[in-house]
Image: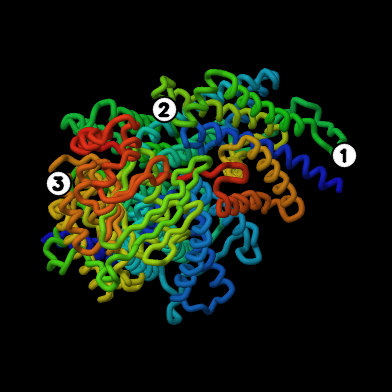
């Protein structure tokens, strides 16, 4: 029942697509739908970069051009190349360029990335114009429709080729994005630091996303060259890039239907602007729709008159202006700019996102979670640390020796030595700014220590990337929660289980048994982990919508998914209510029973004193005490650090009793 | 040798223009972590408004303050429409797309108002070249370099010496803290956009006599100025002057010795290399990421 609706839509859509050229004889319309299909293939790819990894790429027109020219150049120079090879060559060449672009581009983000990709697109356009020995320069390349087995394809037959590839691309992209690869893309947008600490290398998956995206742009480019039968450098310009981005945001990020819709809009839009009479009709209809929608929204209390004023005024003005102008073509770009502005601010989730919200459709995240609940339960949620049983119990799991971490003149960690015994819960306490979190960041590779040695299981981890350290068995949670906000609780844990997948792109694209098996096992395990921390009823909820305390528990579940031998908890009780804290203590103890060693940073002294075996105290970056909780509590230096020196040991014990109330942090505020 | 000197001189003049636009990027990036992707269009509008004023018989020197006022208004409009809503909803994608969209709108409007053709801009100084180190230097080129330096110096002085400037610097250092100290940070951001567009508009009227004025005069200028800002570092004043001169000379040399078609390439390649090797720029400092 649940799956029937999308399946029905897909079947109807497919039938319409295949039968369309039979229904009409008009080559113009066939060509139009063909162009929409080609753009849609590119937009599927662009959405991976823009929607999923959250990067702005202004280089996709350039990549599209590379695909077209790769096809054009091969056909011109080797006319006997079989047609089936052309898109493959175009995909390979463009993916290679995508990788070249990604390497410098992805070390930077935001405006830098936008400018780099813009520079890339500009260079491509210049090169295509200037390298006339290869590209025939501004004259362009003229082609014919492909020949298959000696038969020259007609417009209609070529349409079916494009339609087939559109469906194939749709299926492959959809499967990639619903797999662990897609979750990796989404995770690095949600929180790059957390991705790295879950063993999902941000850099690697950004490059990967760019390469897949470029490959699709290449496929689209090669199809476009056959479709237009003419390739010229000025097609692949800046405006086209902006048009692609407009299509993605207008259609709706992170949906394939949005990309299809966006493609249709940007192909139809220029046609619309060619005909002033038609444009007037559309502008008036559009203004009326927005007006009616706005009135409905205000009437039902879903929006305020102030908020809808600008879009209503904008669209009404557009309709008014359309009657003033005689020649709309000259104002094409300005209108297109205005639409972009309106969409960026008033339709952020795109048409599909807006429709979903208004009609209350659920995303696949929620239904996936329900499906997960029905899977047979996994054996054990928390993997028992195997190495713990095999090696002597009293061995240092972590040996950090004389660690110095210097930021400019500040020594955040000064000559700190920390040895953590396997199987223990090791508390790390100290006043704010004493270097506890810095220690966590050094242990997980986020900072590289200025000096000192850190060994984990006897091997040095200094200089290793966070992702590699995570995969060797160190998992962590964050002081200021770093969840993947737009992903469901279940998906968050699945990102932690990324390391359990061995499937490659082919397994994912074709849903080969290996991927199906791994996905089912991971889902069952993720659900069991949620159950372990008591969040199974919220599996389908987006992480950003969870209450603060639940978010902290979700972070623990996600960290456990890594099968860690060492788990670092950075203030897990901050912002939790008293009953939540009791639950947390139970969970911490249960984790230890599975043989996992813990380092616990916490300001709630009652928690620290009740669960820790050993406590290390830091103050101003230096270790001032270490020992059993009772010994540390009685240590005069510790009391001095916490209370300023003149008070008696009693005072600290008093602080311990009222620890939860005296915490200066208000619940929910990231420290 | 003479040709080389000649190329170096015109490269410096061109580089100073890049530096001015890059300076505009620095101003807004400092206050709001955003920049105007339509900075090239701000320059173009400045030049065309200047051209119209000169055509109406206004003296070149008298025209400059009017163009500055126009630039300030244009910059404030960009900030209000394009940037402020994006800052409010913390959307990076939002301001990038909306400043691009505004740039496209401005260019299209300019095409409809002034026509697509490139038009000559009357030079306020004599056209006869001066002879210097065996090369011919046009007086206008000297004016461009001097004018650009003066303008940057004026803004720097403003930032360091006046209370308004202190507000700008405070907003740069910590926007939230500055707001809590009673500084109207959104006004400061609007102001920085106005200032940024003034510098671009001024650069437009400075360079137009050397090139030509038209809606597409700034097609690649904004991007190349960004390259300069990156090469020099988005926080270094000295960096953009050095970066601008490097890029200006590199372009003139490429244009002469390779092909004019390729003259845009060195700057863009340099941009890619700098970002790959040293994202903070040659003169900028890299920030420590905090978790």
3 vs 2, front mark: 3
How far from the left and from the top, in percent, is residue A44? 36, 58
Q: Mark 3 belongs to which subunit?
A: A
Q: Are marks 2 and 1 on the same chain?
A: yes
2 vs 1, front mark: 2
3 vs 1, front mark: 3
Residue annotated with mark 3: A582
Residue annotated with mark 1: B133
Residue at image position (29%, 29%) is A307
- How far is the residue under mark 3 from the one under mark 1? 83 Å
Q: Mark 2 belongs to which subunit?
A: B
Task: Classify residue A43 by image quadrant.
Answer: bottom left
Residue annotated with mark 2: B177
How far from the left and from the top, in percent, is residue A6? 19, 59
Identify the image quadrant of the C terminus of chain A.
top left
Task: Classify residue A499 by image quadrant.
Answer: bottom left
How far from the left and from the top, in percent, is residue B135? 85, 40
Direction from residue B174 to residue B196 in the image, left or right: right
Direction from residue A199 to residue B270 in the image, left or right: right
């Amino acid at each position: 029942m649940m799956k029937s609706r999308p399946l029905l839509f897909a079947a109807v859509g497919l039938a319409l697509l295949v039968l369309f050229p039979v229904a009409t004889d008009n080559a113009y319309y066939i060509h139009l739908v063909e162009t929409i299909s080609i753009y849609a293939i590119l937009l599927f790819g662009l959405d991976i970069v823009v929607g999923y990894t959250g990067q702005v790429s202004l280089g996709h027109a350039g990549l599209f051009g590379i695909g077209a020219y790769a096809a054009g150049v091969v056909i011109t120079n080797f006319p006997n190349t079989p047609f089936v090879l052309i898109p493959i060559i175009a995909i390979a060449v463009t993916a290679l360029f995508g990788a070249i672009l990604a390497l410098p581009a992805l070390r930077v983000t935001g405006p830098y990335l936008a400018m780099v990709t813009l520079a890339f697109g500009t260079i491509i356009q210049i090169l295509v114009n200037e390298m006339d020995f290869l590209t025939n320069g501004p004259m362009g390349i003229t082609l014919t429709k492909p020949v298959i087995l000696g038969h020259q394809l007609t417009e209609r037959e070529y349409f079916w080729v494009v339609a087939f590839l559109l469906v194939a691309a749709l299926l492959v992209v959809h499967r990639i994005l619903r797999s662990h690869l897609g979750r990796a893309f989404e995770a690095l947008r949600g929180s790059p630091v957390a991705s790295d600490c879950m063993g999902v290398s941000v850099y690697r998956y950004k490059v990967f996303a760019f390469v897949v995206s470029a490959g699709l742009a290449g496929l689209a480019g090669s199809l476009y060259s056959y479709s237009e039968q003419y390739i010229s450098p000025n097609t692949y310009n800046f405006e086209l890039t902006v048009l692609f981005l407009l299509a993605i945001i207008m259609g709706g990020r992170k949906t394939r239907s949005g990309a299809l819709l966006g493609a249709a809009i940007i192909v139809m839009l220029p046609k619309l602007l060619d005909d002033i009479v038609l444009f007037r009709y559309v502008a008036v209809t559009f203004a009326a729709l927005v007006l009616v929608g706005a009135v409905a929204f205000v009437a039902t209390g879903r929006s305020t008159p102030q908020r809808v004023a600008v879009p209503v005024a904008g669209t009404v003005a557009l309709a008014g202006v359309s009657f003033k102008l005689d020649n709309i073509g000259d104002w094409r770009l300005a209108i297109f700019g205005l639409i972009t502005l309106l969409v960026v601010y008033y339709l952020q989730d795109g048409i599909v996102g807006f429709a979903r919200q208004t009609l209350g459709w659920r995303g696949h995240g929620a239904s996936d979670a329900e499906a997960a609940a029905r899977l047979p339960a996994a054996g054990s949620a928390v993997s028992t640390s195997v190495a713990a049983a095999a090696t002597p119990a009293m061995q240092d799991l972590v040996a950090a020796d004389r660690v110095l971490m210097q930021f400019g003149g500040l020594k955040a960690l000064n000559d700190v030595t920390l040895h953590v015994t396997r199987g223990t819960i090791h508390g790390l306490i100290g006043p704010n700014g004493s270097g506890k979190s810095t220690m966590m960041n050094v242990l997980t590779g986020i900072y590289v220590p200025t000096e000192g040695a850190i060994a984990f299981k006897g091997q040095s981890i200094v200089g290793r990337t966070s992702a590699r350290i995570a995969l060797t068995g160190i998992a962590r949670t964050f002081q200021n929660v770093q969840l993947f906000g737009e992903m469901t609780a279940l998906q968050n844990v699945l990102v932690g289980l990324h390391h359990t997948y061995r499937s490659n792109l082919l397994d994912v694209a074709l849903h080969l048994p290996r991927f199906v098996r791994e996905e089912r096992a991971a889902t069952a395990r993720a659900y069991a982990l949620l159950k372990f921390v008591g969040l199974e009823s919220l599996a389908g909820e987006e992480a950003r919508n969870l209450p603060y305390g639940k978010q902290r528990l979700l972070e623990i579940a996600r960290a456990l998914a890594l099968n860690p031998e060492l788990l670092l908890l950075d203030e897990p009780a901050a912002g939790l209510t008293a009953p939540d804290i009791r639950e947390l203590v139970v969970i911490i103890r249960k984790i230890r029973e599975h043989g996992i060693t813990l380092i616990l940073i916490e300001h709630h002294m009652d928690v620290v004193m009740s669960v820790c075996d050993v406590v290390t105290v830091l103050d101003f970056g230096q270790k001032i005490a270490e020992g059993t909780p009772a010994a540390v509590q009685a240590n005069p230096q510790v009391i001095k650090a916490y209370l300023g020196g003149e008070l008696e040991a009693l005072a600290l014990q008093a602080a311990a009793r009222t620890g939860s109330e005296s915490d200066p942090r208000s619940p929910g505020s990231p420290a | 040798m003479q040709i080389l000197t000649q190329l170096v001189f015109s490269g410096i003049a061109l580089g100073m223009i890049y530096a001015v636009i890059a300076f505009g990027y620095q101003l807004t990036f400092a206050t709001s972590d955003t920049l105007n992707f339509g900075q090239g269009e701000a320059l173009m509008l400045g030049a065309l408004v200047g051209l119209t004023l000169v055509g109406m018989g206004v003296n070149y020197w008298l025209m400059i303050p009017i163009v500055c006022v126009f630039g300030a208004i244009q910059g404030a409009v960009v900030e209000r429409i394009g940037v402020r809503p994006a800052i409010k909803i913390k959307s990076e994608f939002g301001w990038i797309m909306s400043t691009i969209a505004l740039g496209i709108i401005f260019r299209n409007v300019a095409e409809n108002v002034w026509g697509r053709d490139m038009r000559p801009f009357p030079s306020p100084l004599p056209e006869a070249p001066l002879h210097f180190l065996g090369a011919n230097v046009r007086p206008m080129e000297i004016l461009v370099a001097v004018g650009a330096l003066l303008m940057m110096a004026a803004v720097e002085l403003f930032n360091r010496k006046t209370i308004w400037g202190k507000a700008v610097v405070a907003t740069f250092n910590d926007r939230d803290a500055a707001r809590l100290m009673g500084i109207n940070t959104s006004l400061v951001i609007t102001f920085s956009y106005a200032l940024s567009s003034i510098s671009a508009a001024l650069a437009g009227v400075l360079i137009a006599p050397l090139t030509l004025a038209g809606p597409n005069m700034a097609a690649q200028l904004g991007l190349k100025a960004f390259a300069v800002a990156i090469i020099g570092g988005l926080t270094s004043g000295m960096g953009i002057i050095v970066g601008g001169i490097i890029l200006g000379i590199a372009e003139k040399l490429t244009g002469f010795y390779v092909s004019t078609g390729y003259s845009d390439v060195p700057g863009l390649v340099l941009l890619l290399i700098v970002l790959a090797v040293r994202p903070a720029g040659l003169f900028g400092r890299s920030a420590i990421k905090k978790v």
